[in-house]
Structures are given as structure tokens and as C-alpha cells.
Image (cartoon, helix red, strand yellow):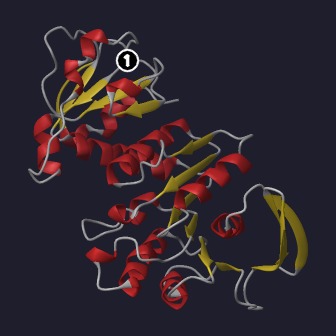
Amino acid sequence: MHTISGILKILEPILVERSIKNDFEINDFEINIKNLEHSNAALINISEASWRKWFRNKKSLKSNFSHIESLEIEIPLIISDERLPESWFGNYIIVENAFEAMKLLGTYFREKYQNPLIAITGSFGKSSTRMMLETVLGDYELLYNRGNANMRIPIMLNLCKLIRNPDFALFEVSLNALNNRGNMATNIKPDIAIVTGIGEAHLSSFSGTEEIAEFKARLFKGLSEEGVAIINGDTLHVDVLERRARLNTTHIKKYQIENDNEQSNIRVTDVKTLKGAHEIAVVFNGNNIKFMLNSLSKGMVYNSLA
């Protein structure tokens, strides 16, 4: 159980001011006041000035305080990098910077989190692979991206949300979170890192698909020696992905459809097209397995193998 006093201790390095009247339990965080759904969630309020700095003056977002008086749910704690409205009489912690607060909280709760964390990136198939995993693991308590919010700030927030201690955490990771602004794989520290494929998405920002593969392979930098890298063995620049993965782990798994490679852990031996579905036969670590996939998309066949 985590309480406001525990949150305050984590944020001490950037603390400006605090007012704690009731030491409530906290088991979730949100940065958008409209997403608050229960009374144990703390609101991290990001000031308009901080948003402007984050976006390098190209755009800005409003803080949450324009909506606070109309909110029906009670907020047990507000963490903010700007002064609160005079009408607010609840608990608050003012910090130097809300983004730094998210980093401190995310780092702390990631270190405490011991259940499997699966991170997924790729030029295609990220969301559908994550949603397949959501279905397969549906009997467990899960943490996963809201919609397809897979860029840097939503990932920072999801690291904070590890306070919930879910049975599994599924992080869909965009190129934005792996780029030169800082590789968030070292914050995420996945137990399993999946690269679904390399394609020409974002090509206008790179010299070619090989450079895209190099950036996507940054996800593997978060793996420990015991971590597992899962790679689409049929994709472009699979050699780049495998080489980069081996810098962090020897536990590398590949799946393939097109190439009959005995070194792949999962190989498709037959795909039968039925009415609205595929019947897929695979060899998985030497065992013959068949399963049904309610989709006619070849891309979804690949995603099911991951």
C-alpha cells in the first residue's frame, strides 16, 4: 500500500511546498483531470509553462485547474508545478517540475515492480500485437496503453501507474520514445522486448530502413541479461535487430513465415484460409501446434506469432 506520505518522500528532491491534511492511500496517477475515475488516483498537474517548454515553444496545453471546480470525483492528492487555485483546500505537493516528478515516481515504481513487463515496438503491428496479448491475458489484472498512446509522456505516466502492481504490464512503444531525446527503454526495463517488424514508416526522418531498425533496436537496451528479445525473423534488417539484442541478452526468440529457418523458435508450416479465419500450423521449439485466428490478414498472422 502506498500513501501520500510515501509519495512525498519520493518527491523530496524536487519539493517546493506541501500541505498534507489526510494521509490517503494512492494507487493510481493521471495527468488529465478528465481521466480521473476513482478516489484513490492522484492528479499530476502540468502547468502551461511546462507544456510549452516540453514542446519547445511549438505548442502548449492548458493545465487542469480550469476544470477542477466542475469535477465531481474527490481528488486525494494533487502534484503540481504551479500554484493551486485558492478554492482548493485538499492535499497538495508543489514540485519544481511535473515532468521530473513523473520521472522520479516512474523510476521508483518500476524498481518495485516484479511482475512481467512486455514492451512492443515496430514499424507496424504494435497495437494489434498488444491487443492480442490483452485478450490472451484477459483473466489477469493488466496495465496497458490507453488507446494507442505510445509516445514519451504516456509511457512516463504508465511507469507511474505501476503503483497498481498489475499481474502484467504491456507497453506499446513508439519511435518517439526511443529517439535521440532519450531512450526510454532504459526506464521501461522490459522483461520481454518485441520488435514486430521494420518498414518505411517515418522514412522521411531517417536515411533509410536500416537506420529505422537501429532506432527500433534501442528497445533491447532496456533488457537485462535474463531478458528475452522477440524478433520477426522475416522482417527487413533482422540481422541488425539480432545483433543489437545480443549486446544485452542471449535469450533471443524469432518467428517466421516466409523463411524455413531451423534456428527460429516459431515457424509456420501451414496456413489454411477458412471463412473469416485462418487455421495456422506452427512448429514451436520442436512441437507441432495448430490454432485458429479470426482474421484473414497476413499481418495479424505475424502478430499472433509474437
Residue 284 position (above or below residue 259): above
Question: Is residue 219 left or right of 56 when viewed as pictured?
Answer: right
Q: Position of residue 169 (x, y in %)?
A: 57, 49
Q: Position of residue 153 (x, y in %)?
A: 32, 48
Q: Residue furthest front?
A: 275
Count of numbered badges drawn on the protein = 1
User: Image quarter for residue 36?
Assistant: top left
Residue beneath disc 1: 76
Q: Position of residue 113 (x, y in %)?
A: 54, 48
- Which residue is rendered at x = 25% and y = 18% of the image? 67
> Image quadrant for the C terminus?
bottom right
- Choose between 79 and 50: the one closer to the eye: 50
Residue 4 position (above or below residue 123): above
Label 1 environment density (alpha carbons within 10 Å; few <14, some 14–19, many ≥20):
many
Q: Amino acid at mark 1?
A: Pro
User: Image quarter for residue 297?
Assistant: bottom right
Question: Is residue 163 left or right of 52 when viewed as pictured?
Answer: right
- Which residue is rendered at x = 89% and y = 67% of the image? 290
Residue 297 position (above or below residue 146): below
Q: Position of residue 148 (x, y in %)?
A: 46, 49
- Choose between 135 and 247: the one closer to the eye: 135
Question: Is residue 265 left or right of 53 when viewed as pictured?
Answer: right
Question: Is residue 66 left or right of 107 when viewed as pictured?
Answer: left
Q: Helix, strand, or loop for circle 1? A: loop
- Which residue is rendered at x = 52% and y = 81% of the image? 245
